[in-house]
Image (tube, grey):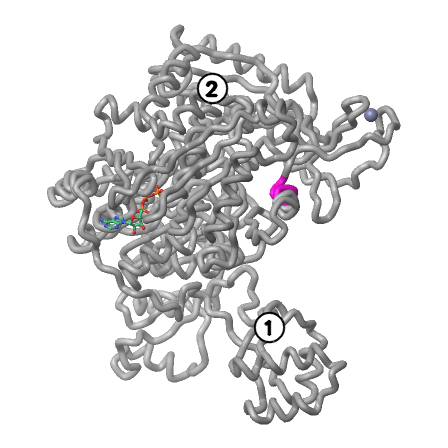
Amino acid sequence: MIARVIVDVATNQTDRLFDYLIPAPFIDTILPGMRVVVPFGPRKVQGFVLEIGETSEFDIKKLKPIEELIDVEPPLTNELLDLSFWVKDQTLSFHIGVLKVMLPAAMRAKYKKEVHPHPDISIEDMSPHLKTFFKQHDSVLDWDELIKKGTDLERKLLMEGVKKQELRIIPIVGTGETKKKRNAVRPAFSKKELEQFKSSLTSQAKKQIDLVDYFISKPTEISVVELMETTQTSRSTINTLVQKGVLVQEEVEIRRDPYEGRKFERTEALPLTEEQRAALNPILNKMDKGEHETFLLRGVTGSGKTEVYLQAIDRALSLGKEAIMLVPEISLTPQMVKRFKERFGSEVAVLHSALSKGEKYDEWRRIRDKKVRVAVGARSAIFAPFENIGMIIIDEEHETSYKQEEAPRYHARDVAIKRGGYYKCPVILGSATPSLESFARAQKGVYHLLTMEKRVNNVQLPVVNIIDMREELKKGNRSMFSESLTEAMRSRLEKKEQMVLFLNRRGYSTFILCRDCGYVAQCPHCDISLTYHRTNQTLQCHYCNHIETPPTFCPSCEGDSIRFFGSGTQKVEEELQKVFPDIRVIRMDVDTTKRKGSHEKLLDRFGSGEGDVLLGTQMIAKGLDFPNITLVGILAADSMLHIPDFRSSERTFQLLTQVSGRAGRHEKAGEVIVQTYTPDHYSIVDVKQHDYVSFYQREMQLRKQAAYPPYYFLTLIHVSDTDLTNAIRVTEKICHYLRENLSPTTLIFGPAASSIPRIKDRYRYQCMIKYKVEPKMIKVLQEIIKTYQGEMARTDLSVLIDTNPYMMM
Ligand SMILES: Nc1ncnc2c1ncn2[C@@H]1O[C@H](COP(=O)(O)OP(=O)(O)OP(=O)(O)O)[C@@H](O)[C@H]1O
Ligand SMILES: [Zn+2]
Ligand SMILES: [Zn+2]
């Protein structure tokens, strides 16, 4: 017997199946989808078994045997193995990279496996040899040890035990951060004793008193870190009380189910509005018939798309099937997760990047073991290893985070549709602002278009006012808030209503500039200006992490007119405090949400009314559904328009619409104030009118003129090298080769310097291909990779191909 294996060595020469002999003990147990250890040249490497066969095209005598089975049950299903071939071709990736991206990160490393008697079987009922085996060993047995040390017969018997379900193998996957424990303290005294102790303290021991007070009101265990946070005390104060015997310190296990112990009230399906019903029916119809179709659900913000998703998933479950729900990372908020947990309870697994490796593995395991039937997660959840999928949903389908920006450069939307075809189930792409590609496909009838134009309960869409900031300047208002916005904020503060202030992070960061000579601090390794970070007063490069201290004198003219420009969220917060000294600001940006769970805490605080303003970046644009928000202010609406990317208008329109959508979602009417320097730009005007279709039509005109998607397909080839001339030379050669080999209707642009011509001391060039039909495309691109493979391995040259680019820089 032969196993065909993809080995974990990513070069072009290895990107194919290698044949290995299956040693006798593994013959009955080995299955496609399992990982193995195999000899490869002088090394031992991991690999995935993709096929098992009787014969090899190669000389059997020269084949080497598999050394080890890493998995006892295959982590990848047959369908995912098939899918991996397709993904690798579509994205021009190494096969091994695709297989690995389908598994949770914790499984990319080796892990321990414990052997236990199967819980459904008593040792007495086991086959005789296993019985004696367990009688001899009463401690926990390590699977790999047993396999390594055992005789061939013993190995075979063990394998059979697993197959016959007499044994159970429990993988012990480390969390990566391994420590699963934390320090906690609890009071050793009763409430009365605590009070007595408190009275024995002098008033100098203020911090100790604070701690004692805390435990008088809350006599339960709390982690040391949390205690320090809530009581604003130090570890040493806590230690003092531990030494005095007032508190007991102990190590407690951190539970890996992040939602364990949390109670979710079950919700029932809501009676649908007419529009929701009209959207849901055709989807249910397809599901009942067991047919695949891709639906594009365009529903304005607050139209109740989520309820449609929930009921579609519900139908899949009642048909005995499973469902995958994708949400962009940033809108995978606790609020969002809650809505799914409340409806489907313990049927839901959640996969997102805020989980630790171990937690992610546990959730993934629950899917693979069929313990849950709904997977909610960000991009990679599209590979959830279900085997009977009835529904796949991609919320906010226009989000570019569904495209992975490193190899394998897959788009979750394409994978979703591929899997939907395999399982003959519907796929819903939902958005208030669909991508142009998807809407164009819906217009052509490739996707089935469903529309919801009204908000639930006839709530009105917010009134959008556009403020021309050039006029403000003329009036002499130099602050970052226009008069209208200041007035609107004042009135919300009076009415005790809440507001959201949005600052676009991208293209709008703080930099330093010399007012005399125009010097801007630049990264010495990248052609990009450095960003000023207020918190630790440094200049940082966001591309290579270079850090330096800001100059006090201009390095160029030696003048002292160095100023900080632009406005980050911190700056906005300071300005807000100046105008409204009592305003309570909850700021959400990369700095305030670094710690795990802080995102949730900030939103909870805002939800419970502890803040007047939620101030933030992209992070607050989506998914928020708070009834008391009646004002949304957008500070620099056009900052993204100037990014050199053909999608910049589309992104501006999408983002502004999403942020606006946070206002007035319930009883209270909403207002949006958009501050801009380009009030006449259609992507801003159409936001005011809530007119997606108008925006779509104008943008399509421009895309047509400029030959961009959806009229053309794009492929971008990035060439970079520390050696400038070589980067140019290689790009020239590639362009030449493409011109020779692709059809005459295909447009080839390049070589051109990238819009950031240098990053980390590497010079960057591009070649862009625009095409309509190009059957030879994949072959030609594979040829290019092959040509430069060797040079890339030996030198600093890098040639990257992106067959569906979203980052044009
Ligand atoms: N049929 C219904 N009856 C009553 N309330 C509903 C119904 N459907 C949805 N809702 C409520 O309406 C509000 C808006 O719905 P939801 O958040 O699903 O909208 P959405 O279309 O997903 O919006 P967005 O794109 O802005 O996130 C929610 O509070 C939801 O609970
Ligand atoms: Zn200067
Ligand atoms: Zn840099």
Q: Left or right: where does residue 289 sit relative to residue 69?
A: left
Q: Left or right: where does residue 356 sit relative to residue 476?
A: left
Q: In the displayed structure, would residue 470 be above or below residue 412?
A: above
Percent from the top left, x then y, of residue 366?
Answer: 34, 60
Point 60% across, 33% down: residue: 508
Secondary structure state at the residue bearing disc 1:
helix
Point 65% across, 25% down: residue: 721
Please provide the residue range marked out in magenta.
568-572
Percent from the top left, x then y, of residue 388?
Answer: 22, 50
Closest to the observer, 476 or 212: 476
Secondary structure state at the residue bearing disc 2:
loop
User: Callout 1: few (<14), some (14-19), or many (20+) C-alpha neighbours within 10 Å?
Assistant: some
| Residue receiving disc 2 | 680
Closest to the observer, 618 or 14: 618
Identify the main secondary structure in magenta. helix
- For residue 463, which quarter of the picture? top left
Residue type, numbered disc 1 = Leu
Residue 99 in view here: no
Residue type, numbered disc 2 = Asp
Percent from the top left, x then y, of residue 182?
Answer: 57, 72
Q: In the displayed structure, would residue 324 be above or below residue 412?
A: below
Percent from the top left, x then y, of residue 214?
Answer: 58, 79
Query: In the current view of this chain or complex, which residue is farthest to the right?
Result: 558
Closest to the observer, 63 or 200: 200
Q: Left or right: where does residue 351 sit relative to residue 28?
A: right
